Amino acid sequence: MNVRFMHSLYLAALLGFTNSCISDDLSDCPNPQYIVQVSVKDKNYKNIVDFPQLGSKEENAPFQRFEGTIYYTLSESTTRARVKESSVMTVYGEDRTYSIILTDIPEGEYILTVWGNMTSEYPAGILHQNTKEHTDIYMTTRTLRLDRSYQTTELSLERTKGLFLLLCSNFPATVTSVGQSINHLYQSVDANFNYTGNTNIEKRVPMQPTISTWLAPTSEGPSKVKLIFYTDDTRATAPFPELPEMDLTMKRNEISAIAVDYKKTDGVCEVWMFIQEQWVMIHRLDIQ
């Protein structure tokens, strides 16, 4: 019997043992594997149909179309002691779900918390820090009983933020950037979707017809939004045009929107807000 044939027999036997260990009684495995399949629940915003300019994402799109990274923690359910923690892992591939495989875990009851779209620069649960927007963060959690009776479990990630949509039309080419200042936003969220803290966001981006910003839900009263339009004229002493501060309510997994239409021929700047499923004009300002 040659060496190659003996090696093939060994590999076949090893593979057979591994497969039977995973599919049969976990107590017979030297290192039981507990598999958790992670999917995405909030693939589109609740009111996405009201904003055709954004377009909706395919429900059957790959997992990585919604989640660029995955991070998870496993904690003992009674003491909350952390048993396992992953790094912030980049998602690859075309699968519709992401598989988390837990190994070397003693039998018992645990809490698994999974975060999507996190970065290594921010702690888990922080939605905004240092007035920054951060990312479109997702989260889910589940209590799991890990023992010989365990079967593959599916968890669905839910969005933690809403989307602020700013639509700009008919502005002259001299307007080159837009500043946004928004306050009264929650700063963090825990594994049970309890929001805490109060913060504000500052953002300045190049002028474009559609500007999207991921924002945590409004924390106290209405949020206040200040929009500032800047020109490329270095001699300008004031923003152009000057808009009044406006109330804005942000909600989880919903789009809140403001549209600014600069009508030079009419000598006015109209400001519209999407309120109760319709566009309402809230300001009509004379252009100086």
Image (cartoon, grey):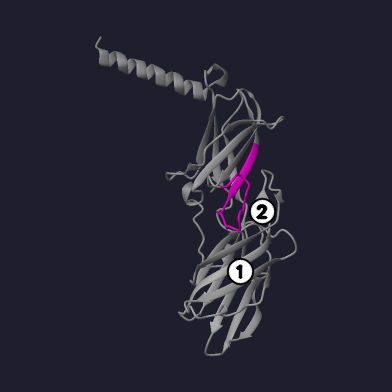
Callout 1 secondary element: strand
Instruction: Determine crowd level at label 1: few under 14, some 14-19, many 20+ residues with C-alpha closer than 10 A.
Output: many
On the question of residue 53 being in view, the answer is no
- Whether residue 125 appears in magenta in the rendering, the answer is yes
- Is residue 225 positioned above or below 132 on the image? below
Give the amino acid type for the residue marked by disc 1 in the picture.
Answer: Ala
Give the amino acid type for the residue marked by disc 2 in the picture.
Answer: Gln
- Is residue 13 positioned above or below 33 on the image? above
Residue 73 % position (x, y): 60, 36
Q: Residues in magenta?
A: 122-142
Residue 161 % position (x, y): 62, 55
Question: Which corner quadrant of the image does residue 219 belong to?
Answer: bottom right
* Quarter of the figure that contains the N terminus: top left
- Total label count? 2
Kindly identify the residue that appears in the image at 67 percent across and 72 percent down.
Answer: 246
The label on residue 182 is: none
Kindly identify the residue that appears in the image at 27 percent across and 15 percent down.
Answer: 5
Kindly identify the residue that appears in the image at 52 percent across and 60 percent down.
Answer: 56
Dominant secondary structure of the residues highlighted in magenta in the image: loop
- Whether residue 1 appears in magenta in the rendering, the answer is no
- Which of 280 and 180 lies nearest the eye of the viewer? 180
Q: Which residue is mark 2?
A: 187
- Which of 132 and 61 lies nearest the eye of the viewer? 132
Query: Is 276 on the left-hand or right-hand side of 45?
Result: right
**Mark 1–mark 2 distance (CA, rounded to whole Å):** 21 Å
The label on residue 257 is: 1
